[in-house]
Image (cartoon, helix red, strand yellow):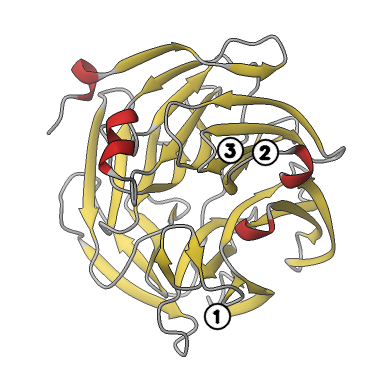
Amino acid sequence: MWNVLVALLLLGVGRWTGAELQPVLKQVTEPVEHGEGPHWDGHQKVLYFVDIHQQLVNRYDPATNNVSHVKLEGGEVSLVIPVADTEDKFVVSVGLHLVLLTWNGVDEDPDNVEYITSVEADKDGNRFNDGKADRCGRIWAGTMGPEKIVGEVTPDQGSLYSLNPNSFMPETEISPVSVSNGLAWTSDNKIFYYIDTPTLQIAAYDFDIQSGSISNRRVAFDLKAHNISGFPDGMTIDSNNNLWVAVFDGAKVLYVDPRTGSLLGSVEMPVTRVTSLAFGGDNLETLYATTSRFGLTEEQLAQQPLAGSVFAITGLGVRGTHPNTAIRTVQ
């Protein structure tokens, strides 16, 4: 196992545009192929994330700087959400399936994998992409169309689904979408933010926490209007209800006020394919960023050898919010 502590790379003061901050970036894991779906477990104080095409769920422990993983068979693994009141159970996507993974966080083989549900059996080449739980424990997970070349996805083949924790039957919330991606809720659970990547927009919806319904779509932020190159990917929200957005093929993280549609700042990254973000650490003041090297040429990899690493970004002057966990009452 690669010794992350020895190989830890301090990248120094990150390039920041916006407020007078000096974010510090650290590489905290060795590169994986296509890192995604970070989720901070505040109870165990570890970060879970996936390696999509290698079909791995990874566990990074900042206290020991160790990374362990488990491999799942049957398709790409794109999201991992811990189940409430457990330390070894997770809702994980495998292709177009959602499964309940039991894993001790150490061994490379799962203790148990239990099928939950599937979607889009009639759409060959589709797969789940990003997903999170809301405050009530519902799973929100979306799909994307076939991707023959990185970044070139068959449009309008996917959907965003919600799954009631009492039945885990998927209900279509938004359709069609092309690449279902970042999700976030405000601290009062009144607004839901969502990214369908090719639109280059962050959409806002009114959200009813009791029913789980969304309505009244509007544009909260538009990358094209701000002349930002690259594509919006995963995102997270801070305690001030501002969004932090990973920009795939844009080599940056955006700091956005979705109420005004303004860009508050951005963190320049040492790799182009930034995939997703999650706040973690004891005080939720560390922003973890997953990245990808999938599809990069040999020349590009030589220019950005850290592509695929997880980075810890500190010094941002904000705190995150506690991520929601899944609730599963049907056994």
- Label 2: element kind: loop
Reading the chain from its start, which is encountered first: label 3 or label 2?
2
Q: Which residue is mark 3?
A: 322
Q: Residue at x 62, y 41 (%)?
A: 229
Question: What residue would you read off at disc 2?
Answer: 228
Q: Quadrant of residue 305?
A: top left
| Amino acid type at image mark 2 | Ile
Residue at (33%, 37%) from the top-left corner?
300
Q: Which residue is denoted by mark 1 in the rendering?
A: 169
Vertical placement of residue 232 versus 253, above or below:
below
Residue 329 in view here: yes
| Residue at x 43% of width, y 26% of height | 270
- Position of 126 compared to 206: left or right? left
Q: CA distance from mark 1 to mark 2?
A: 38 Å
Of tags 1 and 2, which is closer to the observer?
2
Q: Label 2: how many residues lie within 10 Å, few (<14), some (14-19) or many (20+)?
A: some
Tally of numbered discs: 3
